[in-house]
Amino acid sequence: MGIQIAPSILSADFARLADEAAAVSNADWLHVDVMDNHFVPNLTLGLPIVESLAKATDTPLDLHLMIEDPDRWAPGYVEAGASSVTFHVEACRAPIRTAREIRAKGARAAMALKPATPIEPYEDMLSELDMILIMTVEPGFGGQKFLDICLPKIRRAKALLDKHGLDLWIEIDGGVSAETIERCAEAGADVFVAGSAVYAADDPNAMIEKLRGLAEGAAQ
């Protein structure tokens, strides 16, 4: 599987989303943050824009639902064109059922954890998932500073996957840059969401390859 880079359109120009998606053609995924101004204090986009974006790019969409009641809404994002849908376990009433519904509709299912949420209580349901998203900032806004206190959680998550022989991806979201990505890769992460680091670069595709190279070197 190797290292994967997922630029976050939260840092892109929302008036030019199709162009901004094309500007990161080297990306493995396009990370899309859906916020409802309830679970997090910010409002971004919803189903109609996701559906339009899926038609405008060949890059698979990695949906991150920072919303209340993801049990109700998550399957609809698969129907809108998402290839991976992540729900926050803190907001989910029935995470196993939700993960199974996402998978049944043909997408990868992922569970997100806020910085203060431990991984250990969810050990028994890891086999129901394709990916774990470990937030390395508090969810809700782009451009935040990376939280080093999350590195031990990445290591513990990797240890749990190794313990059970599970081939899940570990995704990191928040403050990922050339200065922080190596620490995350060393800890066991393999999918990296990068917003401002990519979209603020003079050459976004060149930055994607720089980040990929740094992570690959650290992972080895």
Image (cartoon, helix red, strand yellow):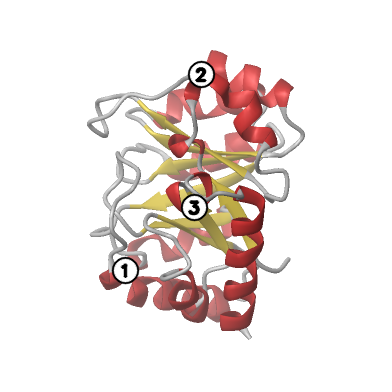
Residue 8 in percent (x, y) is at 50, 42
Determine the residue located farthest toward the top in the rendered image: 48
Number of numbered markers: 3
Pair 2/3: label in front: 2
Of residue 169 and residue 160, the one placed in the foreground of this image is 169
Of residue 162 and residue 176, the one placed in the foreground of this image is 176
Q: On the image, numbered disc 3 is attached to which residue? A: 194
Residue type, mark 1 in image: Cys
Q: On the image, numbered disc 1 is attached to which residue? A: 150
Question: Pointer 2 and pointer 1: residues touching (CB < 8 Å)?
Answer: no
Secondary structure category for the residue under label 1: helix
| Residue 58: quarter of image | top right
Side of 106 where 41 appears, left or right: left
| Quarter of the picture holding the N terminus | bottom right
Indicate which disc residue 15 carries: 2
Residue 138 in percent (x, y) is at 26, 50
Pair 1/3: label in front: 3
Side of 75 where 112 appears, left or right: left
Residue 113 in percent (x, y) is at 36, 54
Q: Find the distance from the CA under tag 2 to the CA under tag 1.
A: 33 Å
Residue type, mark 3 in image: Ala
| Residue 116: quarter of image | bottom left
Residue in view at x 48 percent, y 67 percent: 178
Residue in view at x 45 percent, y 62 percent: 177
Residue 107 in percent (x, y) is at 67, 39
Within-10-Å neighbours for mark 2: few <14, some 14–19, many 20+: few
- For marks 2 and 1, the one nearer the N-term is 2
Determine the residue located farthest toward the bottom in the rendered image: 220
The answer to whether 4 is drawn above or below residue 16 in the figure is: below
Secondary structure category for the residue under label 2: helix
- For marks 1 and 3, the one nearer the N-term is 1
